[in-house]
Image: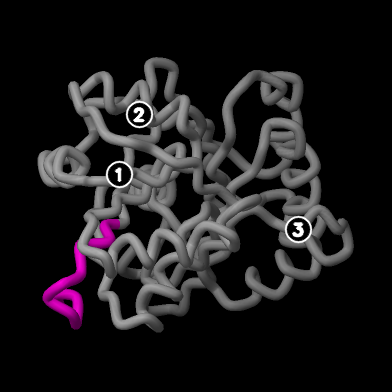
Amino acid sequence: MKNLSFNNGDLSIVTSPIGNLDDMTFRAVNVLRSADIIASENVRRTKILLGHYEIECPMISYNKDNESKKTQALIKSVKNGQNVAMLVSAGTPSISDPGFLLVRQAVLSGIEPVIIPGVSALTYAIVASGFPVQNFCFLGFLTKKKLKRRKILRFNAAASQSLFIFESPFRITQLLQEIADEIGSETEIVLVREATKKFEEHIRGTAESMLLLKNKFKEKGEFTVAVNTYHFNETEQQEF
């Protein structure tokens, strides 16, 4: 569906690579080349991306600290006929990153955003995990409140599904301990780190075995954590 007014420009929500610049799609490159304004969560990183594809375009900073102030200005630019592209540091906007507010306010203003799909740390981990994904739940970055974190894990594990969580290297050991305590020490886990990059890594094991490797997790790089809490019924057990 195109924008409701023929005078509007396009508001494009663009997925950017999560590590490997060659994962940019042809469509995403063309959209950025035709943009009048690029709203970027991280201008420095976006400059590297644009330079790789020889794209020149005015940029503004658009992140969680200023999105409430800048959203209406971007929508006004679209209504004035300009093509606006928005992207985050890595991956798909709105998925644990800025983007939701801009999309929401655009829709309320009669502008239908153009979504430019591409690589995502979440979809990468879903495939890489090898876990059943008939039912799965994405929890993003868990709250820092310890009791609430544990409650969230217990509640979602009871639903018989695979869980996918984003976590920093500074709290990964805490998360593994919480999984062991609240879901079980033998819970299957896959840690995905540095996906699509030179040193990408998939670490597989149980919550208990992962905790024995905790010194390894102090290295740089955020994790996508896959947790298998799927409870097979008799028919499903035969299928797997």
Quarter of the view holding residue 30? top left
Q: Residue furthest front?
A: 80
Q: In the image, is 97 to the left or to the right of 21?
A: right
Looking at the image, residue 55 lies above or below residue 36: above
What is the secondary structure assignment of the residue under circle 2?
Answer: loop
Quarter of the view holding residue 78? bottom left
Residue 203 x/y as whole percent:
53, 31
**Mark positioned earlier in the residue sequence (3 or 1):** 1
What is the secondary structure assignment of the residue under circle 3?
Answer: loop
Dot 2 amino acid type? Thr
Q: Which color mode does the image show? A: one colour
**Residue 143 bears which disc, if any?**
3
For image coordinates 29% across by 53% down, the residue present is 84
Prevailing secondary structure of the magenta residues: loop
Q: In the image, is 211 to the left or to the right of 89?
A: right
Pointers 1 and 2 in contact (C-beta within 8 Å): yes
